[in-house]
Amino acid sequence: MADWKSEVEEVVFPGKICVPYSWTVGSTLSRWYVQLRDDGEIWANRCPSCGTVYVPPKIKCIKCYKDMNDWVKLPGTGTIETFTVVNKERPGLDPKKPPFVYAVIKMDGADTGMVHLIGGVEPEKVKVGMRVAPVLEKERDGHITDIKHFKPIA
Amino acid sequence: MGKRVGIVGVGQTHHASHRLDASGVEVIAEAVTRCLDDAQTTLDAVDAIIIGNMDHFENINYVDMWAVDGLGGCMKPVFKVTTGGTTGTTVGAAAYYSAASGMFDTVMAVGWEKNSESDTQAAIATCANPVLERDPFAGAIGPLATEYSMYMKAYGATEEDAAIVAARDRNNALNNPYAHNRMHVTVEDVMNSPMLSYPVKFLDMCPRSDGACAVIFAVEEKAKKMCDRPAWIHASVVRHDYTHFGDLEWQWMPTLERATLQAYKYAGITNPVKEFDVAELYQPCSTTGVKWLDSMWFCERGQGPKLIRSGATHMDGIIPINPSGGVVATNPIGATALIRVAEAAWQIMGRAGDRQIPNVKKALATGFGGCSWSDVFVLGADLP
């Protein structure tokens, strides 16, 4: 393998096809995003059979496969279940310049964790079990980044 | 041959160019829910799930992971299968083989696509070899146009022959509430529609759609309990061949010849035109509705046009083809071939509504994809 360059000329073609992708949010999540955008509220939906409360909302209960038409408004506060500090930049992937913190947040009033950024605090001060609340953008367009980040609360 | 297996329930979405009301997960849920309703059962009765689509159409990998709430796959064995255009029949075949093997009693096959979420032609071109054939030959329309040109030259088939097929399928779709394109079309309309790649015109060619389909396969003892008239699987055959366009036989289709020959052997079919009561065929362009009849042993080579002109394949003919409107009316690609199986099953089960052919005992369904790959299902009202 060491001397393959003497036997094989490097020939590499660059791709020309650029496929533009878009994703339909759908009836369940569009309702969730509209509530976030217009009212600045985080809602969840609850299984009518087993009572599990999901945030972000589910199309069907993953355990019971029931329709999820029972909506509940959450206070927005939650607790950090686990997190990491991103230090190395991944070009084109990161939501902001490192270092930053992303975390799984167990939302009050829901049975599931929600993933988002932790801000308004030095990364080294973030702890598991820390209580947090969302910081919303003033101009919201119905996107997950309408929540700027979650920040520690007393 | 494994255990005897029957289809006990079928569900499909209302297909459309842009299902902007529903995410990919939601179209999957729509098909699964309708399938469970059709089978009058719940997910508890489903032992395993096979799902398929083509990732390059939506740029989301792992549908078996992110769609699990819509699919109902939580804590079940879920397998993903992708084989290009044949994906729908291959998920069906994999579901059938899984049940026939004795490993699972009841297996659900799900095919879906949200083709509105990308540029279908650009995405489909990525199936061609990137360093040899992608620039000079890729895409769906060109190769189909090229093969019909050869068939026209060899056997005297005409553009009108293809237009008869396009008008037949598009008008059949008027009877199918799930179809994407539902419009009355004459042979003249097809002939007058814009030329895409000679001899293929706009109304000859399939659309690309958003939609999903689900089918439940159950082993004999379960199927008899779940359904009073299951569609029994008499044969399910898959054939692939060379990958480069230049390797192919263009005058006829060897994979379809071999797959149907094997399927007819399994199912004891000796005269397909007489013995089948209906056929739901993956014919992505009306030209293939003429040319591929030869390769399914419906006629001698070159006699496809004669069969089409005779009216034998229309709703009142001896072998109605595509009562649903077929692929030129509806094409959510990863679901398209499974819809053929689903429609054929509904014809056997007597659940095909306004497009029902009376008293269907034997039905043929096909899938087409990859580089001229063929899948074949033979379904029957009687146990194989």
Image (cartoon, coloured by chain):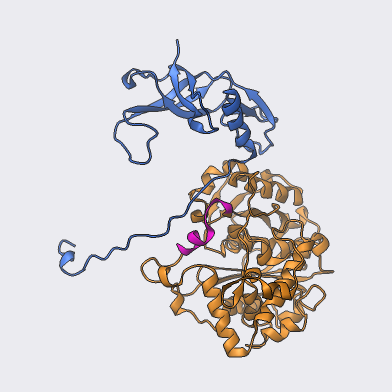
Chain colours: A blue, B orange
Does residue B263 appear left or right of residue A136 in this picture? Answer: right
Q: In which quarter of the image is residue A13?
A: bottom left
Please name the residue shown 78% across and 80% down the image. Answer: B311
Please name the residue shown 62% across and 70% down the image. Answer: B194
User: Quick check: is B359 in the magenta stretch?
Assistant: no
x%, y% of residue A48?
Answer: 70, 30
Please name the residue shown 72% across and 49% down the image. Answer: B34
Q: What stretch is highlighted in magenta?
A: B116-126
With respect to residue B36, does A15 lie above or below? below
Q: Which of B40 and B222 is in front in this view?
A: B40
Q: In which quarter of the image is residue B160?
A: bottom right
x%, y% of residue B141?
Answer: 55, 70
With respect to residue B352, does B193 lie above or below? below
x%, y% of residue A112?
Answer: 54, 28
User: Quick check: is B123 in the magenta stretch?
Assistant: yes
Q: Main secondary structure of the magenta part?
A: helix
- Residue furthest to the right: B358
Q: Which of B247 and A17 is in front in this view?
A: A17
Q: Quadrant of residue B74?
A: top right
Q: Nearer the viewer, residue B345 or B199?
A: B199
Q: Quadrant of the N terminus of chain B?
A: bottom right
Does residue B289 appear left or right of residue B133 in this picture? Answer: right
With respect to residue B157, does A77 lie above or below? above
x%, y% of residue B329?
Answer: 68, 63
